[in-house]
Image (cartoon, helix red, strand yellow):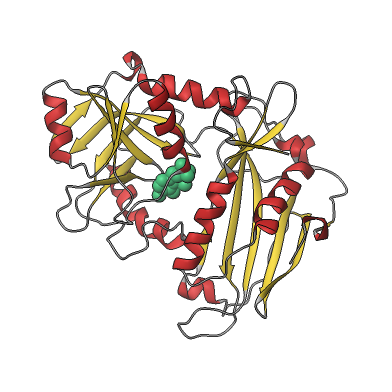
Amino acid sequence: MIAATDIQVTKVEQSKLKDISLDNIPFGKYFSDHMLEADYIDGEWRNVEIKPYQSFLIEPSLSSIHYGQAIFEGIKAYRDAAGNVAIFRPYENFKRFNTSAERMCMPVVPEEIFIEGMKQLVEVDKNWIPSTKDHSLYIRPVMFSTDTALGVRPAETYKFFILLSPSGPYFAKPMKILVEEEYTRAAPGGVGFAKNAGNYGGSLIAAKKANAMGYDQVLWTDAFEHKWLQEVGMMNVMFVINDTAITPSLEEGTILKGVTRDSVLTLLKEMGLKVEERRINIDEVMEAYKNGALKEVFGTGTAATIAPIKELRYKDFVMSFDTDSWTIAPQAKKLLTEIHNGTAADRYNWLVKL
Ligand SMILES: Cc1ncc(COP(=O)(O)O)c(C=O)c1O
């Protein structure tokens, strides 16, 4: 077994930080000085090291680019006013990463590498955590297969790595969302609950079509009737109907088990709302809109935290919202942000301090 102390650390001679301003930084464009890397060879994880951010040398026969064994995660680290650093609920991402690994016939990554390695890496690059409002250090763990031979089968070798990217908000403005009826993201028995790279490649065409129509993203629907709602692009979705927040349930295995989804459900209960995890279809949403019961619709995700939806379109029916008058999504976002920033008590033990 690899102990956290076994991680070899090689530091850069000079930080790139002097050339980059961390204020108003876009999402995912810049990477910190260091990365973590590990190799899975002969049935065990080896060569765990933190080293200067650098390229990989890959062979054209690399199995993951042919057959798609590639998974990832997205996590955030925050700094409080006193300078203490905390990572938000990384154990949830650790579990989900290994759920994705099992679905894709990849080896699990042990806690000593995923969690302890991540903590050590963030410690090394903690100066990269922005202090600006709505900014944080985005953490991207990835695993891909590295066999160099053709043939569809689970690979025998893999690489795991973690990148750090100081980032601003993903969706800075309320979103316009199109309900997708042509393309399918996930069906029962598929890979919708896994965070494998192919899910994102497969989703691009729908987002591209939506963008051309003036929308930011699509709201995915089920594969059979295109009526049952799943999730939005990189976010789970919640509908506030009267005093109940409703979000699609997980049991069909067609949506990602969002860490923000779970956190926001907890905070909404704290705010006194009823919450329901169940199947919900577009007819119910349109009916609630028509009779004034649909109060708010928003997405939840690590990158965007809570993103209000100002327009939701199904066929020719457009539901528009005055998001400035909303109270629930802004209050939930405030409570979540206060926990992130350490200005409120971490009452659910969500923060893992360095
Ligand atoms: C497809 C999809 N759904 C939902 C989410 C939200 O999950 P989380 O709140 O864990 O970031 C994400 C982002 O990771 C996603 O990519």
Residue 190 lies, in percent from the top left, at 33, 64
Residue 306 lies, in percent from the top left, at 43, 31
Q: Is residue 201 visible?
A: yes
Residue projecting furthest to the top: 325
Going by the image, does 344 lie left or right of 130? left
Q: Please determine whether, in this image, residue 39 is positioned above or below residue 119.
A: below
Name the image quarter holding the N terminus: bottom right
Going by the image, does 319 lie left or right of 245? left
Q: Nearest the camera: 344 or 135?
A: 344
Q: Residue at point 27% right, 60% down?
A: 187
Q: Residue at point 79% right, 35% down?
A: 18
Residue 92 lies, in percent from the top left, at 53, 47
Q: Nearest the camera: 180 or 336?
A: 336
Q: Is residue 72 visible?
A: no
The quarter holding residue 248 reads: top left
Residue 40 lies, in percent from the top left, at 66, 72
Q: Nearest the camera: 59 or 231?
A: 231
